[in-house]
Image (cartoon, helix red, strand yellow):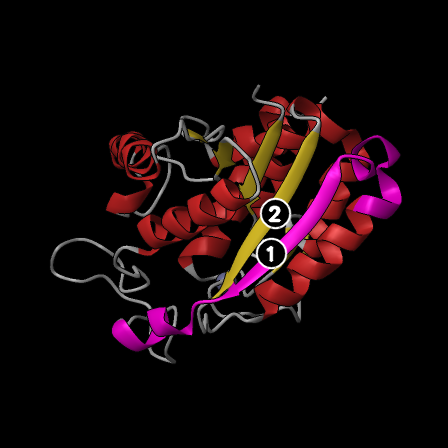
């Protein structure tokens, strides 16, 4: 029975929306996060606060929200030299990928999540990856994750389903999905307590939340929110 799910929850907008999505669908939901020396370590603080406030403000979900797992993945910072794990300027590489790309990150995340899920009898993994307005990260692609689902299922000799509710949803649609799942209260919680900015800047509060307002992640979040307000907000 697919009544339990493990959500890859980073503390960002997308995975927070996926967490609400999972809480609407499954009887018991656990969360997993990874500390890999991301330079916006502020994301990990947001993650703890978001979980606490979600429990406080949404009684119907608090009862289903179970254990949180935070794994030390500092090895990822040691094997990759990217703008997400070291203090260097965000720019585009010759292959068209931004230098925030941490090679194999999602493959490693899902593999570790599957190991935890296996041990805990959870058959569903949920992640906020998206092909719609993503940075071209190849490990966010639907095909990558579908093939990983098959690999994990074979390697663990058990059915392991990877759900990616945002795969074909753009950023405006992600805001609309949050509104649909938890109304104004969830939208406000996502604005206040999730983090997207690559620079870890939380000094300015915009209509869409905190961030520098200029990095690619902030731009995407801001544009999506503006379009949500114009076209999709109730
Ligand atoms: Zn930013």
**Mark 2, residue position:** 31
The relative height of residue 39 versus residue 207 in the rendered view (above or below) is below
Q: Is residue 223 visible?
A: no
Label 1 CB, ligand 1: below 8 Å?
no
First of labels 2, 1 by sequence position: 2
Q: Are marks 2 and 1 in contact (CB under 8 Å)?
A: yes
SS of the residue at dot 2? strand
How many discs mark residues in the rendered view? 2
* Of residues 4 and 102, the one drawn nearer to the viewer in this rendering: 4
SS of the residue at dot 1? strand
**Callout 2 crowding tier (Cα within 10 Å): few <14, some 14–19, many ≥20:** many
Q: Quadrant of the C terminus?
A: top right
Q: Which residues are magenta?
A: 55-79
Residue 58 location, quadrant: top right
**Mark 1, residue position:** 69
Q: Position of residue 21 (x, y in %)?
A: 63, 29
């Amino acid at each position: 029975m697919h009544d339990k799910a493990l959500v890859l929850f980073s503390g960002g907008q997308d995975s927070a929306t996926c967490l609400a999505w999972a809480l609407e669908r499954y009887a018991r939901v656990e969360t997993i996060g990874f500390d890999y020396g991301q330079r916006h370590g502020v994301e990990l603080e947001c993650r703890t606060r978001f979980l606490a406030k979600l429990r406080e403000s949404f009684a119907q979900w608090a009862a289903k929200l179970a254990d949180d797992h935070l794994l030390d993945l500092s090895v990822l910072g040691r094997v990759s030299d990217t703008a997400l794990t070291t203090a260097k300027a965000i720019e585009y590489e010759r292959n068209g990928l931004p230098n925030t790309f941490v090679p194999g990150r999602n493959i490693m995340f899902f593999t570790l999540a599957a190991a935890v899920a296996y041990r805990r009898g959870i058959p569903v993994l949920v992640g906020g990856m998206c092909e719609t307005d993503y940075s071209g990260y190849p490990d966010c692609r639907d095909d990558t994750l579908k093939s990983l689902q098959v690999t994990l299922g074979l390697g663990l000799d058990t059915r392991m389903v990877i759900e990616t509710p945002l795969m074909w949803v753009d950023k405006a649609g992600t805001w609309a999905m949050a509104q649909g799942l938890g109304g104004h209260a969830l939208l406000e919680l996502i604005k206040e307590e999730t983090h997207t900015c690559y620079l870890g800047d939380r000094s300015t509060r915009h209509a869409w939340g905190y961030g520098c307002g200029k990095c690619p992640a902030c731009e995407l979040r801001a544009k999506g929110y503006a379009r949500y307000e114009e076209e999709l907000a109730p």
